[in-house]
Amino acid sequence: MKKKLLFLVIISGFLGLNSAAFSMQVASQFTKAYVVPSGGSVNMGFVLTHPEKVLVRALGPSVQSAFGQVIGDPLLRIYDINLNVISENDNWKDNPAKGEIEQTGLAPSNDYESAVIVELDPGLYSVEAVSARGEAGNLLVELYSLGQASAVYDDFTLSVLDAEKWNITAGNPVTVDGQYLQCVTSTYVESGRTYLCSISSTSSDYEWGVALQETPGVTESPLFVRRCLGRKEGVKVCAEFEVMSNRNVYARIVQEGADGLPQAVTFSEKIGTLSTGAFVSFAVDMVSRTVSFVFSSQGTDTIITVARSFGDLEEVFSQSPLVIYSTGTSPSKRSFLVDYVEN
């Protein structure tokens, strides 16, 4: 059967994310059509510009009140540009990724509806939904972005910090056994009466992220990962991860003081727990002025996101360096628990 691409959609990142515990792009794209018997189908095409994790679902019974006559048992397929079937599902609860689908909050409400989660490389794809029983009726097909499947980051495998990638802004952080960063000394910040150790990326590309790794037996303190979003009333407003000593990871919006330390915290929400390792990054949408905090635990395919709007900023930064820092009340060695290998 010839597959038709009804239209193309550019998915460029996290657009319109909400602040659910496991957020998703709200209807990245959707299409509704009437399916006739004997091979009729709903088709949707899309193109990805970077590796992307997507959820696609086909709904019938759950949208009957809006669409009238619907397909009672949708069957969903995803094709690559050569029309090879990449993923297929009839009833979503039979999908091996059932648990992950439920975590997104996007699980269909009817057992006969279909849903798939798949990681895709950049390229052209198409979605097809048909009736598994050959019946006629309406179908709704929706495509959601769950975030980039991978991002660029430094795993600190060198014996010294790579000066082409990182600037030392406070203290003396060094790599230890190519596994993590440790501050040999810290810089005393008079205004905050605290000791600070900090590095910033030489790149201001928003697709940078950081991999975190628990390092047993090393003196630990809270770790922060920050990107500034813009300025309001002359004060920088930044997105920040806080990795606490108890391993809880918080997504925060902070106001940055002149000393580079938080002046005020305007938003804070727990996003995950660092059990062994994790990957964190920021997805910034300059069009909708939304920042998404992305958290992925080592050894799982689950991507947790929390999104916040920064639309009230008077000045928005289109680029900003990534800052990793640790701060405390004593000059003792403080470790950046940064390590991990690429997903």
Image: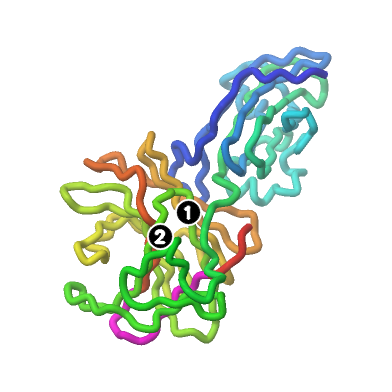
- Earlier sequence position, callout 2 versus callout 1: 2
Residue 192 in sight in this render: yes
Residue type at the position of mark 1: Trp
Give the SS element for disc 2: strand
Q: Is residue 174 left or right of residue 311?
A: right
Circle 2 Cα neighbour tier, 10 Å, few/some/many (<14 / 14–19 / ≥20) = many
The x, y position of residue 312, in whole percent, is: 25, 41
Specify whether residue 334 is painted magenta.
yes
Q: Is residue 90 left or right of residue 148?
A: right
Q: Is residue 18 left or right of residue 113?
A: left
Is 134 situated above or below 178? above
The residue closer to the viewer here, 270 or 187, is 187
Circle 1 Cα neighbour tier, 10 Å, few/some/many (<14 / 14–19 / ≥20) = many
The x, y position of residue 54, in whole percent, is: 61, 40
* Between marks 2 and 1 in the image, the one whose residue lies nearer the viewer: 2
Residue drawn at (73%, 32%) of the image: 80
The residue closer to the viewer here, 305 or 327, is 327
Is 25 situated above or below 243? above
Do the CB atoms of the residues marked 2 and 1 lie less than 8 Å apart? yes
Give the SS element for disc 1: strand
Range of magenta residues: 327-338
Count of numbered labels shown in the rendering: 2
The x, y position of residue 176, in whole percent, is: 51, 80
Residue drawn at (73%, 34%) of the image: 112
Is 328 situated above or below 37? below
The residue wearing badge 2 is: 201
The x, y position of residue 290, in whole percent, is: 38, 42
The residue wearing badge 1 is: 208
In the rendered structure, find residue 99 and report the number of the disc placed on it.
none
The residue closer to the viewer here, 337 or 160, is 160
Residue type at the position of mark 2: Ser
